[in-house]
Amino acid sequence: MLSRLALGLFKIETTYGTDSVPAPATNAVLIYDLTMTVDGRVLNRQTLDASLSRRSHVIGRKLVNLSFRTEIKGSGTAATPPEWGVLMRAAGFAETISTKVSYNPISTGFESVTGYIYWDGILTKITGLFFDWELNAAAGEYGSIQWRGQGLYVDPTDAAIPAGAVFQATKPPMVQSATLTLGAFATGVIQALQLRGGNQLAERPDLNSPEGFKGTLFTGREITGSVNPEAVTEATHPFWANFKAGTEVAMTATFGATPGNRIKINTAPKVQYGAPNFGDRIGIRTYEVPIFLNRSASTGNKELIIDHD
C-alpha cells in the first residue's frame, strides 16, 4: 500500500452514529497529512491463582482518532459551500447559505458526519465523527485548517479506492493583502494568524448501548489563537494597555480576492489579548500575542463568523 494513495469522503449524518454512506461524486474532500489511530479500551483480567502469567484480555469500547489538513479555498461559487464546509458543521458550526455561505458557532443542534477513508486497499468507516479545528495562515503561504476528529469504530474491510471522486477545482489563494485588523490597528506587519476551536468532547458510558458506550457529545468550546506582529509603540496600538484592562477589540481578515474563492473572518467582534511576549524575527522585535475570542452578545455564540463569498 502506498501512503500517497488515499481518499477521504465525509457526509452529514441524519442520526448520530448511523452510516450516511458518503459517495465519491458528492462527498469527496481534498485532504493531506492523514493519520488515524484506534483507541480500544483493554479490559485486563487480573485474576488470582497459582501463576503470575497474564490471562487474555477483552477489548471494550473503541474510538477512532482522525487527523488531517485541508486547504483554505473556496468552491468557486459564492453560494456553494467549500469542500471543508461539511467539516465545519461537524465542528460545531451552523451553515447558512444565501448569496454567500456563512459558518457561525452553535451551542445546540450539533451535527455529526460519517467518514470513509480509503487506504489503497483498505476501507475504514468512522461514524459519529465530531471535529476540533485549527486555522493556520502565514504570510506568503496558502492557509490550511488542521482537523482532529473522533468517532465510532467500524471494522475495516478490503476495498479499492473508488473511481469518480470529484473535487472542487479552485486553488488555495496565497495569504496576502489579508487586511487583518485588530480594533483600529490596520497597519500591523503580521507574519501569521492562528485560531484554535477548543472543542471539548465527552464520552458517554451507557450500559444500554453496545460496548457500554453511547458515543461522544460536545460539552464545551473555547476559541483562542495568536498573532505575531512586529512590535509597535503603545501610541500606535496599545497591546499592553488592552491586555491589562481586558479590552475587547474586533478582528477581521480576508484570504483571497476572487469571488467564490474568498474566505473571511467576518467578524470576531470581541477579541481579548493575553500577555504579549517579546520575540525576534531576523533582527526585528516582535510580539507574540495570545488572543481569546469571546461571545458577541449575552445570548452567546458568534465568537467569529467565517464567510465564503
Image: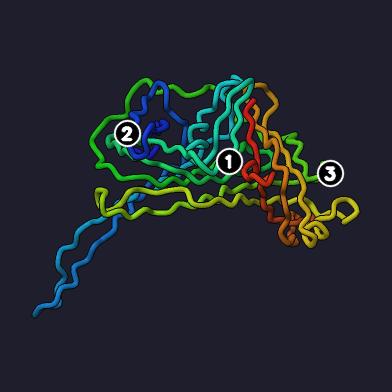
Residue 167, image x and y in percent? 47, 24
Q: Position of residue 204 (x, y in %)?
A: 36, 53
Q: Residue at x 58, y 28 (%)?
A: 96
Disc marking residue 43: none
Q: Does residue 87 appear in this view?
A: yes
Specify the quadrant of the image occupied by residue 82: top right
Task: Tell me which residue sits at (75%, 44%) in the image.
Answer: 250
- SS state under label 1: strand
Q: Which mark is residue 105?
A: 1
Q: Is residue 87 above or below residue 205?
A: above
Give the vertical position of 292 relative to 146 (above or below).
below
Q: Secondary structure at mark 3?
A: loop
Viewer-proximal residue, 270 or 126? 270
Residue assigned mark 2: 19
Residue 154: % across, % down: 27, 42
Amino acid carrying label 1: it is Pro
**Residue placed farthest to the front in the image?**
299
Q: Nearer the viewer, mark 1 or mark 2?
A: 1
Q: Which of pointers 1 and 3 lies earlier in the amino acid sequence? A: 1
Q: Residue at x 54, y 38 (%)?
A: 93
Q: Tell which circle, 1 or 2, labels the residue nearer the N-terminal end.
A: 2
Q: Amino acid at mark 3?
A: Ala
Q: Which mark is residue 184?
A: 3
Report the side of 101 relative to 44 (left or right): right
Q: Residues within 10 Å of mark 3 (few under 14, many from 20)?
A: few
